[in-house]
Image (cartoon, rainbow, N blue to C red):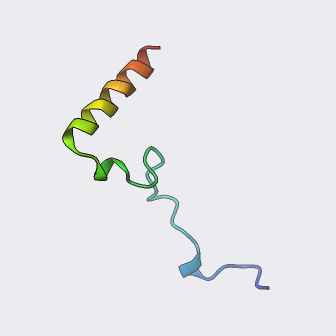
């Protein structure tokens, strides 16, 4: 088993969006984004 991974096997973690790693936010409609924004604002105050 090779010790080093081939370059194409190594994920580029610098470009990963750690806030939304599965990019689910891009799949939401405007209403759903507003709900998420409200939930984040509430979480920040709590």
In the rendered image, residue 25, in percent from the top left (x then y), is placed at: 33, 47
Q: Is residue 41 above or below residue 13?
A: above
Observer-nearest residue: 27 or 16?
27
Q: Position of residue 27 (x, y in %)?
A: 30, 52
Q: Residue furthest bottom?
A: 1
Q: Residue at x 31, y 25 (%)?
A: 38
Q: Quadrant of residue 11?
A: bottom right
**Image position, residue 20 (x, y; %):** 43, 48
What residue is drawn where x is 20% and y is 40%? 30
Q: Is residue 12 left or right of residue 3?
A: left
The residue lying furthest to the right in this view is 1
Task: Say which quadrant the N terminus sits in.
Answer: bottom right
Q: Is residue 46 left or right of residue 37?
A: right
The tally of labels here is 0
* Residue 15 sits in quarter: bottom left
Left/right of residue 22 with respect to residue 5 in the rendered view: left
In the displayed orientation, state which residue is furthest to the top. 46
Q: Residue at x 76, y 84 (%)?
A: 2
Q: Is residue 41 above or below residue 10?
A: above
Place of residue 7 in the rendered image (x, y in percent of width and height, measured from the top left): 57, 80
């Amino acid at each position: 088993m090779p010790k080093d991974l081939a370059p194409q096997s190594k994920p580029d973690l610098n470009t990963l969006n750690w806030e939304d790693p599965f990019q689910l936010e891009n799949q939401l409609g405007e209403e759903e984004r507003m709900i998420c924004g409200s939930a984040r604002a509430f979480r920040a105050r709590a």
